[in-house]
Amino acid sequence: NAGVTQTPKFQVLKTGQSMTLQCAQDMNHEYMSWYRQDPGMGLRLIHYSVGAGITDQGEVPNGYNVSRSTTEDFPLRLLSAAPSQTSVYFCASSKMDRDPLEQYFGPGTRLTVT
Amino acid sequence: AQTVTQSQPEMSVQEAETVTLSCTYDTSESNYYLFWYKQPPSRQMILVIRQEAYKQQNATENRFSVNFQKAAKSFSLKISDSQLGDTAMYFCAQKGRQGGSEKLVFGKGTKLTVNP
């Protein structure tokens, strides 16, 4: 298993540009989520999904869109990038069960918006 | 709402010694899960240890153990025989159900440095 993969690893955008951060997992996990990590802030939940066709907002959803058309993929879209979105982005997945397991994280994407 | 607090932004320890990282949390749920994640300079998030709230016995994984005090809502991580490879950011996290969905809430992290 490749686990959770994210592309790209690094990205520089200009203010106002749009882009999609890709996330895929091959573990047949129902639950997938996106976090952003800022210095001194820990990880904050942006959006999450409990299965294909189902998404919901997390703690900091503004400026981001998500969709979940398949179990494997959970892309994060920035429609109009802003400098405040400069951050490291992590995708994570886990099984949803009566006894939930830990989340598996991707390697992260470092995004800089100038 | 769930909150997780790590009151020690930075800590250091000498190699082979023991160090304890603190974490407190707040939740209204009766059944939840607590985790410690390690983030080395590679940026990868690595699960260190987890604890189910309904289990009274403290979890242990090799040199890592927790002191889980449910009434005090405290979940500290003890690292014994510290090694240079333990140098990393450590995040405490709580997982529970809100609105019928699984959510993971993180603390702000503690930067641990192990000195030779």
Image (cartoon, coloured by chain):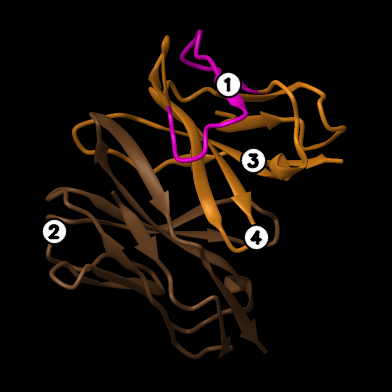
Chain colours: A orange, B brown
State how far apart marks 2 and 1 are (Cα).
38 Å
Q: Quadrant of residue A21?
A: top right
- Closest to the camera, between mark 4 and mark 3, is 4
Letter of the chain that mark 3 sits on in the rendering: A
In the image, B114: left or right of B57? right
Regarding residue B89, the answer to whether it shows in the image is yes
- Residue B70 is situated, as x and y percent measured from the top left of the image, at 16, 67
Q: Which residues are magenta?
A: A57-77
Which residue corresponds to mark 3?
A89
For the residues beneath circles 1 and 4, the answer to whether they share a chain is yes
User: Mark 3 and 1 residues: CB-CB less than 8 Å, in contact?
Assistant: no
Q: Nearer the viewer, mark 3 or mark 2?
A: 3
Along the polypeptide, which appears first: circle 1 or circle 4? 4
The C terminus of chain B: image quadrant:
bottom right
Amino acid, disc 1: Asn
Q: Earlier in the sequence, mark 3 or mark 1?
A: 1
Residue B55 circle label: 2
Q: Which mark is residue A39?
A: 4
